[in-house]
Image: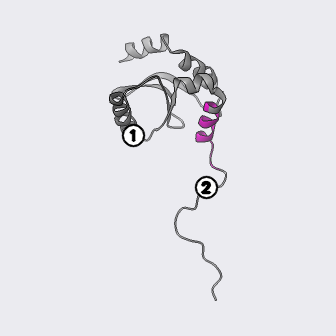
Amino acid sequence: MRDRARKLRASMTDAERRLWRHLRLRQLQGLKFRRQVPIGPYIVDFVSFEARLIIEVDGGQNVERAMEDARRTAWLNERGFEVLRFWDNEVLLQSEAVQQAIYEKLSPHPNPPPQGGREKGPRE
């Protein structure tokens, strides 16, 4: 598995290379990202263990691959990871929007939604 991950690091796609330029060296909120990392039976494209965030860059897919990706995402979610997926062409053609989506996922929401219950008003 480690040998395969090494080979994948050496042969990244253009989209993966472009995204890696923005994730490496703690450029994004000071978080460390690693590339082509084995997690269980899978090798994920990019992961920040600190943020428990995995970023996958997908090329063209068929239905069979989409089903496998859904199983993979569910398995990773069960282990506490959140998975963001982007298409190759999104990374290549809309790089800033992809970076913004990742940034927003990592940023705490300024006005978090209420956590249940309702506000109590003054008693009459």
**Amino acid of disc 2:** Pro
Q: Give the position of the C terminus as an image quadrant.
A: bottom right
Magenta span: helix, strand or loop, mainly?
Answer: helix
Q: What secondary structure is marked by label 1?
A: loop
Asked if residue 99 lies in the magenta stretch, the reply is yes
In the rendered structure, the answer to whether residue 21 lies left or right of residue 52 reads right
Q: In this view, does 51 lie to the left or right of 63?
A: right
Amino acid at the residue labelled 1 = Arg
Circle 1 residue:
79
Q: Is residue 88 magenta?
A: no
Of pointers 1 and 2, the one earlier in the residue sequence:
1
Horizontal side of 99 relative to 37 (left or right) equals right
Depth check: 64 or 79 in front? 64
**Marks 1 and 2, how far apart at CA:** 24 Å
Q: Which residue is drawn at 63% across and 26% down?
A: 95
Q: Give the image location of residue 26, x and y in percent.
A: 63, 27
User: Mark 2 = which residue?
Assistant: 112
Q: Which residue is drawn at 57% across and 17% down?
A: 17
Range of magenta residues: 98-109
- Which percent across, then down, holds residue 32? 58, 28
